[in-house]
Image (tube, rainbow, N blue to C red):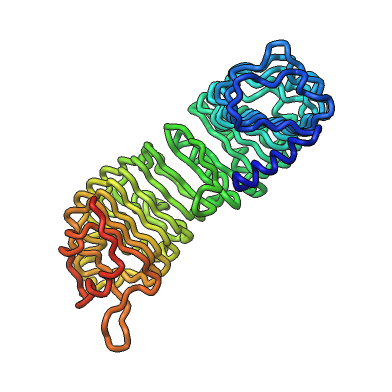
Amino acid sequence: MHDVIRDMALRITSKSPLFMVKARERLREFPGEKEWNANLERVSLMENDFEEIPSNMSPHCDILSTLLLQCNEHLQRIPECFFVHMHGLKVLNLSRTNIEVLPSSVSDLMNLRSLLLRWCENLERVPSLAKLLALQYLDLEVTSIEEVPEGMEMLENLSHLYLSSPPLKKFPTGILPRLRNLYKLKLSFGNEALRETVEEAARLSDRLDTFEGHFSTLKDFNIYVKSTDGRGSKNYCLLLSAYGMGGFLITDLKVDKSVFLEGCKICEREEPIVLPEDVQCLDMYWVDDVASLNDVLPREQGLVNIGKFSHDLKVLSFGRCPNLKSLFSLRLLPALQNLEDLEVIECDSIEEIVAVEDEETQKELPTNTIITLPRLKKLRFSNLLEFKSFCSDNGVLVCNSLQEIEVRGCPKLKRLSLSLPLLDNGQPSPPPALKVIEIKKELWESLEWDQPNAKDVLNPYCKFVVL
């Protein structure tokens, strides 16, 4: 909602005795007990500067349904008795507060439907949830809890569960199968994750709309993918990383099915990574044992099986992968016909995007090997010190859907290898969807082109950058 409209709505509702709205007023003192009328239905005190709620405060607000206290980043303490007389509460939002303990009186809020504690980074303890049978939405993302709250298995009406707490080492078995109404699930599997729990999460994939999973080990990641038969939920985001999951939501992503690999080893001889067969976005960051996308291709009895590699891939991104020499080989092209976005950033060893596997194959290739990526819209190459061309000297790239090209910090680039569509008179024309080419002017002037006049045709689309 637009801020002006929202503020107007808050002013209107604040005139009613059923509402108390003191949002974003930078208040330091918590409203006194006299302001908490018995007929209050909704209270919004978000984005203020409260440090604590008075220790003996226990408002008698039996019909209060919504209490919004999020973004009070200085709020450290809530008295145990505060929620004792709020039995009608349905929505409690304490996200982005500085609390360390959630009062035990929350355990008796049996009408509660939404309990939101996202980004309470110091929160270490949540009381028993066993009585909260009406709870549908539980958000414990980016907290400091080390154990799953007691009574979680009783929450059979839960539809949304976000539980990605970095200190959480393991999630007990037997809980997930009892949460029969789960629709969206975000879960982190710590270093001590149980195989049974990972398999339980995988068995939910058929009925979940959205799954976001952070895996700390390659072993657990592979167990999950294999247990889903290579195909996950309708929407999923799988992260394999020794670091935290972060606060991103699947709604922030470009596609429905994504895999992020960060700071991990994925080409272990004993157990190489297994990717979902329907992944649409593959993002590798600081993966130092990968020389090419070919290294992660599925294999059967030692032989590459391209048929089991995703043909749905739309986004491919590599960042800071120091041993990356090329992105993929010619034989992988049939699986990349849906690729829309290609990005390579700060990979110091990469020389070309498309590589020929061996010298014999290169000798057999025609003079101009046509590399077609019919749906490619965006190319981004940034800070690639050894990058020379998109493909070898006898290859040309055809992608008439191209909209954006960005090249920065690629001092050795000689050819973009781009083949432009031809007009009836045989002259080249820009790709019909092209919008911009961002590149340093000196580099642009030095590029070599296979087609005459190609540079002149594309020059109007250039946006020259300094770096």
Number of callouts: 0
- Residue at figure coordinates x 62%, y 40% from the top left: 185
Return the x and y of residue 372 as percentages of the image width and height: 35, 70
Residue 199 occupies which quadrant of the picture?
Answer: top right
- Residue 39 falls left or right of residue 223: right
Q: Is residue 363 visible?
A: no
Of 123 and 133, nearer the camera is 123
* Residue reaching furthest to the bottom: 425
The x and y percentages for residue 143 are 55, 26
Q: Residue at x 80, y 33 (%)?
A: 18
- For the point 70% across and 28% down, the residue is 152
Residue 163 can be seen, yes or no: yes
Relative to 37, is 301 above or below? below
Residue farthest to the top, as pictured = 56
Q: Position of residue 390 (x, y in %)?
A: 26, 61
Q: Does 209 appear above or below 262?
A: below
Residue 159 in the figure: left or right of residue 420: right
Question: In the image shown, does 51 or 366 lie closer to the viewer?
Answer: 51
User: At 50% across and 43% down in the image, what residue appears?
Assistant: 238
